[in-house]
Amino acid sequence: MTVATLRDPTVLRWSLLAVVCLQLPGLQLVVKHTPEALRPWVGAVELLALLVYALGLVALVRRPNVQRALEGRGVLAALTAIVIAAIAIGYPWADGLSAHGGGSDADDAMKQVALSILGGGNGYDASTYLGNPISPGSGWALLWAPLTVVGAYPMINVVALLLCAGALGREGGRGALAGSLMMMLCMSSPGFWRAIVTGNDLPAIGACTVAVALWLLRTERTAVLWTLAITLGLIATSRVVFAYLPCLVAFAIYRRSPRRALLVALVGSAVCAAVHLTQMQLVAGDYPPLHLLDKGTRAARTTGPLGLWLPSAGAALLMLRRWELSPPAWHLWLGLFVPLLTVALGELAAMEWAVAMWGGTDYLLVAVPPFAAWLAGELTPPVETHNG
């Protein structure tokens, strides 16, 4: 890394964003497994080390010779193989912790909802093995039911990331390079690795949202447009707090296609509302996914209503200001990251800043693929075409 690299404001800005957006989701994981005596220092040391790493990564992938080496589809295939190998080794171990009352129940919640509905139940007959209320909506769980039924659910994030990589590569004719860079950026996050080996669906939510947004801009077939709008509505059911996803995607693509934006906002929102309202009628008592709203309520008690809403309002104003300047992935990243970070920090404050217990970092995993997709797009400008 040269002095000129350190003085490049673009490299510095992208690197700082990469540390916050890609590494913050893994901060709790690192601190939790650090001896308690070292914890006051490990957070600062980790962030400094990751800043140096991010500077090197961003500077490296900007080099033309490195980009040429990453252009082949074999690179993306190799990166995917590494992720699949990690799942093959790590998921059975992580899933096995459930026998001792440990591990993560995020994957069990997804599988439980899908299998229950396919078996004639309402999807929310029981809580998870840890006693937690189920968070995913039925539309999202059923979207991945084919993987669940054949026993391949752990591949959810791999499939979602490949869909995102494919859509990103076709955007502007960037090819496989953009998809490979997106995958590399995701793989730099410790939180990403924990998510894939535990079957946590949060990264898949962000990846699928980006994929649908980019495909909406490419297709010319009416049937495909409607299918994508309906699919986005099902993605929006992933958590009740993501019911705004159709409107966020509509905002992100409106400048380039107002009619498609209106279609996806109306159809996607209608599908999301229909799924949740139908499930509410089928479930006796409280609707379990609504428990997530309590997190925002607890955060508001700590930060105050203004502390909770002002950052999101600021992000919305920034998105409006950069409406015609920034690509869809940038809007999706900011529209997801800022509200999630606000709630996560509110939760951390309520816990008296006990980072080792900060489960709120998991929320930020949703924004990792959109950020990686945006930065990969910035690092690989669209291929210019010339009419002879």
Image: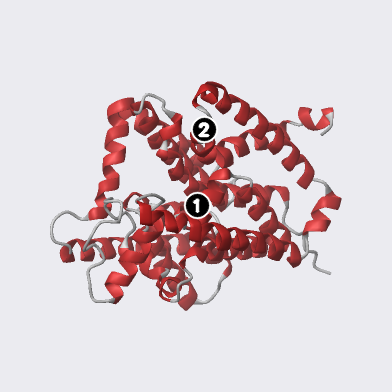
Gap between marks 2 and 1 measured at Cα: 17 Å
Mark 2 crowd level (few <14, some 14–19, many ≥20, 10 Å Cα): many
The residue identified by callout 1 is 195
Q: Locate residue 26, reporting x and y percent.
A: 53, 40
Report the side of 312 relative to 1 (left or right). Answer: left
Q: Quick one: quadrant of the N terminus?
A: top right
CB under 8 Å between discs 2 and 1: no
**Colouring convention used in this rendered image of the protein:** secondary structure
Residue displayed at 54% across by 36% down: 30
Q: Residue furthest right?
A: 65
| Amino acid type, residue under disc 2 in the picture | Val
Residue 38 sits in quarter: top right
Which one is nearer the viewer's eye here, 22 or 128?
Answer: 128
Inspect the image, locate mark 1, and give the three-letter code of the amino acid beneath it.
Ala
Splitting the image into 4 quarters, where does residue 15 fall? top right
Residue, x 42% and y 69% (percent of image)?
144
SS under mark 2: helix
- Residue 48 image-quadrant placement: top right
Q: Give left or right: position of 363 versus 373.
A: left
Q: Which mark is residue 31?
A: 2
Q: Nearer the viewer, mark 2 or mark 1?
A: 2
Answer yes or no: is residue 251 visible: yes
Q: Is residue 345 left or right of residue 73?
A: left
In this view of the protein, which residue sits in the foreground, 178 or 129? Answer: 129
Q: Give the percent coordinates (x, y) of residue 206.
A: 49, 54
Badge 1 density bin: few <14, some 14–19, many ≥20, Cα 10 Å: many
